[in-house]
Image (spheres, rainbow, N blue to C red):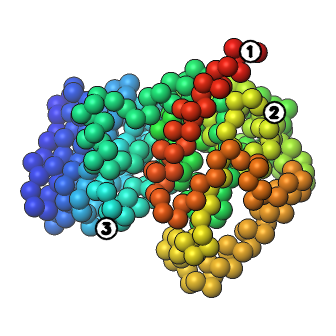
Amino acid sequence: MAAFRIKGEDDIPSVTLDRDNNIFEISGRSLPEETMLFYRPILNWLDNYARNPLPRTEFVFDMTYYNTASAKQFLEILLKLEDIYCMGYDVRVTWLYENGDFDMEDAGVEYARIVNVPIVMATRETAMKHAANGQDANTGAQEFAKNETFIVTIGRELGAGGRVVGRLLADKLRINYFDYAVIEALATQYDADEDIVEKVNHNNSNWWSGIRDLIKSNIGKKEQSETAVALTDKQQEILNRIARNESCIVAGQSAFYIFRDYPNHINIFICASDENRISKLMTREGITRDEAIDIINRVSMERDMYVVENTGMPRHDTRNYDLVINMDNISEEDAVNIIISYIETRKKYFALLVDND
């Protein structure tokens, strides 16, 4: 397959799409006069590439500035990469930004929230340092996740960024991420005694495409009137079945309690000051300060009640967690690196437990 290249200019990004050398990169400024026309051959090239992709595709976005029209085209590129990922191929996207460029960092985080493809956030300084050393900062933790089944649970306050931290952590460790939106969808569609794990994994190397197929194929087939208790029981059963088969990250208010008897588990709680949570929610949802305060208060009360009813423990009791991270002065990527460092510290302890089983 012929490589595709565009030489960058003042308002035109450099583009390299080279299958033979596994180089896929867009960098620089993106302000072309006809944005859709500019990106059309790039999208067409990716369509052709998707017919015979490499086992592992590493795509790099190294943008210094781009307009709204380009942002939409980046999303189209990511969705095409998502299609390849959902076919069972290994796809990794790296989103580079300058240290202190919060707008560019937030843009990458938002893409990570929208698309189902691993997106690793990294400053250019960090990327250059690792490249110079020939290292991947997460290799040790990745190998541990591959060799020892363990669970990371993430409790979080609304607006603190816990969901993004969970997704980024899963991407870096190359393990699966589950939150209650996914688990509830599965629990609603299937009885807890059905073998969910085998259904999803059978002839399918990608969890998310399997989950999508299962849910889509069964919509409308099963009318259920679930009590809250029955649905909660199903969710817990599904989570336990998943955990017995693979390492994963589970985000949810009472996940720390569900996995309390697992020797290999780490409980994380992500929090932030009220002011930062309010500000983030206002920006993310485009709402007023009063509306953000009302939502935070309502959701916090609901989560507190849920945890107490299902565990008998206060949600904010720090004794429930191994690591509590305040997000006020750090980024989501910083939080992920802290957790990975903690996993590296704990892995020797995990190994001892496994040896003594």
Disc 1 to disc 2, C-alpha distance = 16 Å
Left or right: where 157 falls relative to 39: right
Residue 15, percent across and down?
A: 18, 46
Q: Is 335 placed above or below 353 here?
A: below
Tell me which corner region of the image, top left, top right, bottom left or bottom right, holds residue 205: top right
* Residue found 36% across the figure and 52% down from its top: 76
Q: Residue at x 71, y 21 (%)?
A: 353
Q: Position of residue 232 (x, y in %)?
A: 84, 48
* Residue 137 badge: none
Alpha-carbon neighbours of circle 3 within 10 Å: few (<14), some, or many (≥20)?
few
Q: Is tag 1's residue or tag 2's residue first in the polypeptide sequence?
A: 2
Amino acid under disc 1: Asn
Q: Label 1, on which residue?
A: 356
Q: Amino acid at mark 2?
A: Asp
Residue under label 2, please give it. Answer: 261
Could you tell which of marks 1 and 3 lies nearer the N-terminus? Answer: 3
Which quadrant: the C terminus? top right
Using the image as rendered, state which of residue 210 and residue 131 is in the foreground: 131
- Residue of label 3: 68
Does residue 52 appear anywhere in the picture?
no
